[in-house]
Image: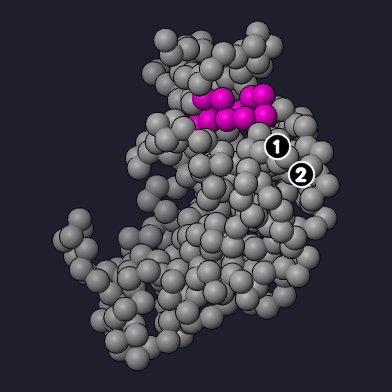
Amino acid sequence: MIDSRQVVRYRTRVQQLDREGGTLSDTAVLDLGAQETGPDGAMWALAVRGLDADEADLVWLWTLRGAPHAYRRSDLNAVAAAVAPWSDADAAKRIFDASKPLKAAGIPVLEALDAVAAELRKTVKAPMVKGDVSGRLHETLPEAYQRFCRSCDAVHLYEMPFRLAAVRAGLELEPHTSPPVLKPAKGFKTTAAFPDRLDPVRAYLHLCGPATVKEVAEYLDSPVKEVKAHWPEDAVEIEVAGEQRWILAGDEAALRDADAEAVRLVGPYDLLLQSRDRRLLVDDPAKAKALWPVLGRPGAVLAGGRIAGLWRPRKSGKRFTVLLEPWGRLTVAERTSVEAEAERLAAFRGAALTGVEYAA
């Protein structure tokens, strides 16, 4: 029987959380993108997979769900093609309420994204802060593209069309900037071609499978109907914990045989925690709420083929402490490995580890 622990073991292996080293080309999570959110974002996701990546070999783009993700720079053009909406209906779903005024004005959503992209290309010729770019576009685009923002007490572009149009315009993000800085992506060229490994549906089924159609649609912010229309022909149905799910045929044996049990401190937005089957990963509602709060997400402790607790970093001056909240008893070996991972995290943050504190 395939249960939740077997699924976590499979994802640990296929997402390469059990390896000690690798190369940029063979790091699988970069096919779907490593989300860049917070200090323990994309680069930490690569570090816990044994990759000491050169940032010059990576490119940061606003892609799926409008979130910033890191990819191989060599994949830039293919990624832009792979993450593009499939249709007007798909684009409308991805930009949420921004589609309503466009439809009321008789503007097809894909046409609107191209219009925003054209203005972005005209505007961003060198690195520019997002607010400055938005201000320029506010002056050039008509009312249907704009909204009143209560928090800013100003009118500016809807957020999602702005973000999704940026990659269409060939703009990348300066890594680790807040507010975001956009700049023209060197070597960008529009293409419709991309390899199967970058297809978001296939990549999700491979890296976060087995999954349902609805879960893939939620991850992509796409309509279920559109995802079904782009469902891989080699996906096979499989029962997991009493529920029917899908996985690529080539991955079924790896799922059934998976035995990976690495100890890792995965970041709050690591791909392991981004799958849409949270109840499968963490079946206790209170624990799930603690791991995925609305604000201030912690990281997760991966141990014993399961999500075994929470962690949070604490940095004060030269002191760097990792606070751990295990959800059960960790073995002596697991505690030793957790402390080694905390050392790695501190080094990644450019600090010396002061200590690991366990919640009572």
Q: Secondary structure at mark 2?
A: helix
The residue at 82%/38% (across/down) is 257
The quarter of the picture where residue 201 lies is bottom right
Write down the region rendered in magenta.
298-309
The residue under label 2 is which amino acid type? Leu
Crowding around mark 2 (Cα neighbors within 10 Å: few <14, some 14 to 19, many 20+) is many
Crowding around mark 1 (Cα neighbors within 10 Å: few <14, some 14 to 19, many 20+) is many
How would you classify the magenta stretch by its main secondary structure?
A: strand
In the image shown, does 351 or 298 lie closer to the viewer? 298
x and y percentages locating residue 139 in the rendered image: 28, 77
In the image shown, does 247 or 174 lie closer to the viewer? 247
Quadrant of image for the C terminus: top left
The residue under label 1 is which amino acid type? Gln
* Residue 197 visible somewhere in the drawing: no
The quarter of the picture where residue 334 lies is top right
The chosen color scheme is one colour
For the residues bearing labels 1 and 2, Cβ distance under 8 angstroms: yes
Q: Secondary structure at mark 1?
A: helix
x and y percentages locating residue 59 in the rendered image: 61, 55
Quadrant of image for the N terminus: top right
How many numbered marks does the figure carry?
2
The residue at 49%/26% (across/down) is 310
x and y percentages locating residue 255 in the rendered image: 76, 44
Residue 6: numbered disc = 1
x and y percentages locating residue 347 in the rendered image: 59, 23
Residue 301 forms part of the magenta stretch? yes
Q: Residue furthest front?
A: 242
The residue at 47%/44% (across/down) is 37
According to the picture, the residue beneath numbered tag 2 turns out to be 255
Residue 115: numbered disc = none
